[in-house]
Image (cartoon, rainbow, N blue to C red):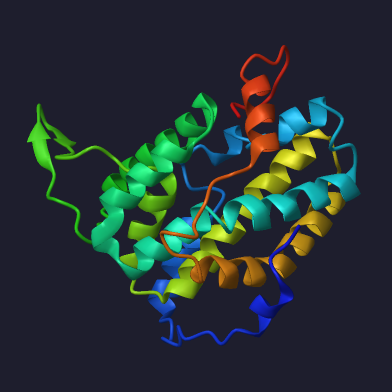
Amino acid sequence: MRPPKLVTTMANTDTTTITDAALLQLMWLASPALPVGGFSYSEGLEAAVEAGLVRDEASAGDWLVDQLHLSMARGDLAVVAAVAREPERAEQLDQWVRHTRETSEMRQQAEQMGRSLGDWQQSVGWVAVGTPPLRATGGVAARTHPTHTYPVAFARAAYATGAPSRSILLTFAFSWSENMMQSAIKSVPLGQSAGQRILARLAAEIPLAVDHAMTLGDDTRQAFTPMLAILSARHETQYSRLFRS
């Protein structure tokens, strides 16, 4: 079930022009080569394959489109939007992400990828807005506060580029879509051409999902995907698996 079609007619008020530098930095953040470990997670897709809910290209595409609209748009994308608008609320929104992860592997993914993104930022000198200075500990730079979960860490890193909020959300959604497409190729399994067709389907749906996410506030943002939570819990003890989620 997708959000009402009226969302597609909403005017985008985020009209800030993106600079070349910001665009290139967003592309960098979306790169599958970014060392955050996203390739090791399927976010329940592998369990859906095991349960027979995803069997081929068509069912994999349907599953991921639904996940984009029912899970990502209402939850993580809405968090990214909120942080991009109000970066000073990062700590509060980070706690929301942690508290709404419904299984241990979902929380582990959010925390591990956020930590890895922070480590990468440190290694390349990418400073997120509001980040306290690093202090030296035995010759190694150390953080003065806990790292954030991935949606919050990504939003803060992207905010530092000066890119408009909608561009940040489009980048986050496409990065997620590309990772999930690769997960489908490995777990169903599928060929590369099938994966590209699934990615094309997701890319066509991303603007609608982003527009929806940008309308959500604290009272309407949600993380409620019971079937995905059940599959994730089953995956934690699945006999044979390729992915960590």
Residue located at (42% from left, 33% from top): 112
Instruction: Indicate the quadrant where residue 227 lies.
Output: top right
Seen in the picture, residue 140 relative to 169 is either above or below; the reply is above
Extreme residue toward the front, this view = 219
* x and y percentages locating residue 26 in the rendered image: 46, 65
* x and y percentages locating residue 231 in the rendered image: 69, 29
Q: Evaluate whether residue 117 shows in this view.
A: no
Q: Is residue 217 left or right of residue 75?
A: left
* x and y percentages locating residue 196 in the rendered image: 79, 56
Seen in the picture, residue 147 relative to 25 is either above or below; the reply is above
Q: Evaluate whether residue 238 shows in this view.
A: yes
Residue located at (50% from left, 70% from top): 214
Q: Is residue 104 left or right of residue 157?
A: right
Q: Is residue 53 left or right of residue 126?
A: right
| Quadrant of the snapshot with the C terminus | top right
| Quadrant of the snapshot with the N terminus | bottom right
* x and y percentages locating residue 223 in the rendered image: 54, 46
Seen in the picture, residue 141 relative to 216 is either above or below; the reply is above
Seen in the picture, residue 154 relative to 118 is either above or below; the reply is below
For the residue pair 52 and 156, the one nearer the viewer reads as 52
Q: Is residue 103 left or right of residue 48?
A: left
Count how many numbered circles sit on residues in the image: 0
For the residue pair 77 and 217, the one nearer the viewer reads as 217
